[in-house]
Image (tube, grey):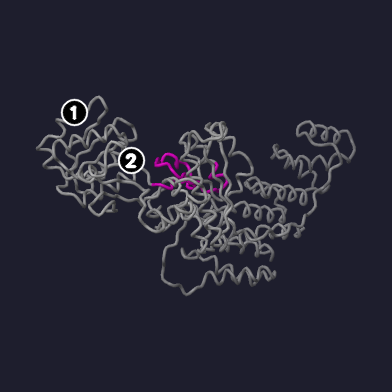
Amino acid sequence: MKGLYITLFGKIYSQLATHNSKLWVVLLLSTTTLPAQKIDHKKNYEAAKTELKNKNYAKAMDLFKKASNEHPENLNRINATYFYGYCAYQQKQYWSANHYLTKLIEKYPTWNKISEAYYLMSVMSFEKREYTNGLLWTQRIVSKYLKKDVENLKWNYLNFPSLKDTVIELNRQNCKDTTLATILYNLVKDEGGWRNKKYAKRLIEDYGINTEPVTVPVSVVIKAPAPKDTLRIAVMLPFNLKENLRDNEIKSNMYLFDLYNGLRFATDSMRKSGAKIRLVAYDYGKDSVDFIRFIEKPELAGYDVMIGPLQNSVAQATNRFAQTTNTLVVNPLSTNLKFTEGSNKVCLFKTSFETQAKQAAYFSASHFNPKKALIITSKNARDSVVAATFKINYDSAGGKTIGKLSLTASTLGKMDNFFSKKTLDSTGVIFVSTKDQYLGVSIVRKLTELDKAIPMLVSADWIEFQSMNFDQMKKQNLYFMGSDYMNLEGDTIASISRSLIKKTNSIPSVYTFTGYELIYQLTRLTKTDVDFFSQPEIKNINPQQGFLFKGLDYKKGKDNTLFTIQRFTDAGFEEVK
């Protein structure tokens, strides 16, 4: 009977033991630097794997026990705990196996291989003839890859005439279990007697059991797959190709094609440096219903990372998908934290507007005097939230908000009273929460008329305002907040731009570079020993330096809290934060 579980273990082992070859997204890692430890956890783990391959279970148990130490620097502790339980099972030390597996299940319920632990618990229960417990454990298994193994497990332990009464009771307790019903049908159909024939007929009617001769499943030898060293990435974006390519030209969503060009170009570049990446793009059109149908496809459960979708309307479905499949989902463009609500596997690649406002408040309180601020916002709900976030954090950082104004195109006259001479003379900074070009230009024009160049924090989108030149931006002392800042004069950008133009025949945009940076951040961690599939929360990651942008930091939440504040000076466009 053990042959079935040993061969299954070969499959499990190959998935778990490739710890060092997996690629991890920089969004989920914890690589806290700690003093060197006397215990070499990694050495014990590698030695234990060797003993396990040689079926020296007793020696492997001792080494896995050491390698399961809960020290935060021990990156193999979860796998080691599972393998200890497996070795204890092989030694028929069921109490030890149960103890370690129970500890793993309770402490790491979101471990991506938790179904393997459930499976081993069910095997031990069946071995001890605790059939009810065995079935309860199988009901917790959600991995589609174990579906056939679970069916075989039931057949191998329950398909015995001597257990007919037991199976009848189990069927009564688990009336939705088709495999159990089929086993029961197989036990009663040939016994004769009207009661058994009636029972068999009822099972056929209730469960749709095939009346053809039942072939009892046998143990199948499963060859261990090659070590998993390829990062599988699904790009799920609303390209809407049916509409865009109807006339053989892209009419809308060009920014998405720019983003994908960056993702694809970076993938090719990283492959040349030795990284193994599988990048597959999916187009769900522009309908959220189509997206929800899309993610129900079994093939999507096999990816490690999903880049996209973008809309908040599918956030709930996305979060559910991430939790169910243990897939990391990265929204590459959104700045709205609402997209991440409901799952610790979903995050933003950019800095949320709340985080930008919060850090801008701290920056303002420490850089501008007097420590008094004016706030201007549009009537837009998001702009109002940003303004409120700035005010709360500016005031708590030692500053004082002395005025707040909500503007629309029809209420610009309110600025005359708001910008009184006395008020402006005592103002250290003006925070403007709007991306509306008309409102932005009107505010700058009014301050120009008043000959006041008070430092003003604004969205980086203002850089693209066509009605305002760089000289005006420098003269009016504008500070731009954004996470897309790049040193355009650097050799790196120039080199990548030339290569992109040559390869795609298109001029790269900030979206192209965003795609490049995202793949770069995913790939760079192939050199680490951390298995991100075992990390339940993205906040464990330490700050990471970027390649094109500033970098990544998820210590304080689900968005990238590293962003820059820039301004125009006589020396050009430069970063001040």
Residue 237, labelled with which disc? none
Find residue 362 and report its horizontal and vertical position in percent.
25, 49
Q: Secondary structure at mark 1?
A: helix
Residue 97 at least partly seen: yes
Which is nearer the N-term, disc 2 or disc 1? 1
| Left or right of residue 30: residue 488 | left
How many numbered marks are there? 2
Q: Is residue 341 magenta?
A: yes
Tell me if mark 1 has few (under 14), some (14-19) or many (20+) residues whose alpha carbon lies within 10 angstroms of its own: few
Name the residue tied to disc 2: 464
Going by the numbered disc 1, the residue's amino acid type is Lys
Classify the position of the N terminus by image quarter.
bottom right
Question: Is 504 left, or right, of 397 in this rendering?
Answer: right
Three-letter amino acid code of the residue under disc 2 = Glu
Q: At 46% from the left edge and 63% from the top edge, which residue is drawn? A: 72
Question: In the rendered image, which residue does mark 1 sit on?
Answer: 414
Mark 2 to mark 1: distance in Å? 26 Å
User: Is 162 a magenta residue?
Assistant: no
Left or right side of 569 for 44: right
The image shows residue 170 at horizontal and vertical percentages of 72, 42
Q: What percent of the width, then of the height, locates residue 265?
A: 52, 51
The magenta stretch spans which residues? Answer: 321-350
Residue at position x 54%, y 48% from top?
A: 327
Residue 308, compared with residue 499, is above or below; it is: above
Residue at left 11%, top 41%? 425
Q: Position of residue 463 (x, y in %)?
A: 31, 42
